[in-house]
Amino acid sequence: MQVFTNIPKYSELSGLYPEFKAILWDMDGTIMNTEPLHALAILRVIEKYHGEVTFSETDLEHNYRGKTDTEVLMAIHARGYLNQLTPDQFIEEKDKFFLDLLPQAEPGTILNEGIKQLIQELASNNIIQAVVTSSEKLLTHHLLKHLDIFDHFQMITTREDTLENKPSPLPYQHTMGLLKYEPNNIIIFEDSEVGIQAASGVTPHIGVAKWY
């Protein structure tokens, strides 16, 4: 496991992992910094059902960063809000607000230019790239297209594609099975404990993204 506080270059990755042929990317918090948008969307959901609340975007962003949607909802339930919503209902409501907010977001505020350059450099060196995310397919496709990087990924695995999501290794196992690469040929980039746990079940080559 290698921690990256700065976005690496292709040459650095090929030096660390000379056998790598493919990269599996986590999305939120790794490819892009969507936490502020997710926090604002959650705040809009809470306001819809409760009016003015004690939550702030900063509170939501910092306290629930790296948590699953279900974990976030349970924490919000504990504070007396959104008890009428199931996890699936919460995700549906949050995603609606997120998609409404997305067109107003400048790509440069979500995607670090260094990440875009690395993705393009990997593509030019014939490295296979896939996104493996617990986000929904509609949200994922909209984000990648908004940031003009959708076409660089040969495969996109979202929460609808497997019976279990992270921290289960199943999303990564599913993706690797379709790509037909051995674990030593794969690098997985993750930023959260949940994602790292999922990645640890499939490859020894994990890049911990700490650049956001």
Image (cartoon, helix red, strand yellow):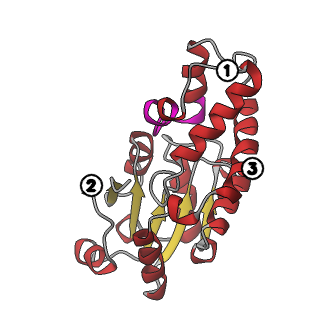
* Within-10-Å neighbours for mark 3: few <14, some 14–19, many 20+: few
**Image quarter in which the N terminus is found:** bottom left
**Label 3 amino acid?**
Asp
User: Residue 40: x percent and y percent?
Assistant: 61, 39
Marker count (numbered): 3
Task: Report the residue at 70% width, 61% height from top.
Answer: 142
Q: Which region is colored magenta?
A: 60-70
First in sequence, mark 2 or 3: give its number.
2
**Label 2 amino acid?**
Met
Residue mark closest to the camera, 1 vs 2: 1
* Within-10-Å neighbours for mark 1: few <14, some 14–19, many 20+: few
Tell me: 211 left or right of 54.
Answer: left
Q: Considering depth in this image, is 183 or 137 the residue closer to the camera?
A: 137
Depicted 205 relative to depicted 91: above or below: below
At numbered mark 3, what does the secondary structure look like: helix, strand or loop?
helix
**Residue 111 located within the stretch drawn in magenta:** no
Marks 1/3: CA–CA distance: 20 Å
Tell me: 92 left or right of 57.
Answer: right
List the residue tagged with mark 2. Answer: 1
User: Residue 107: x percent and y percent?
Assistant: 57, 65
List the residue tagged with mark 3. Answer: 100
List the residue tagged with mark 1. Answer: 52
Q: Considering depth in this image, is 128 or 108 the residue closer to the camera?
A: 108
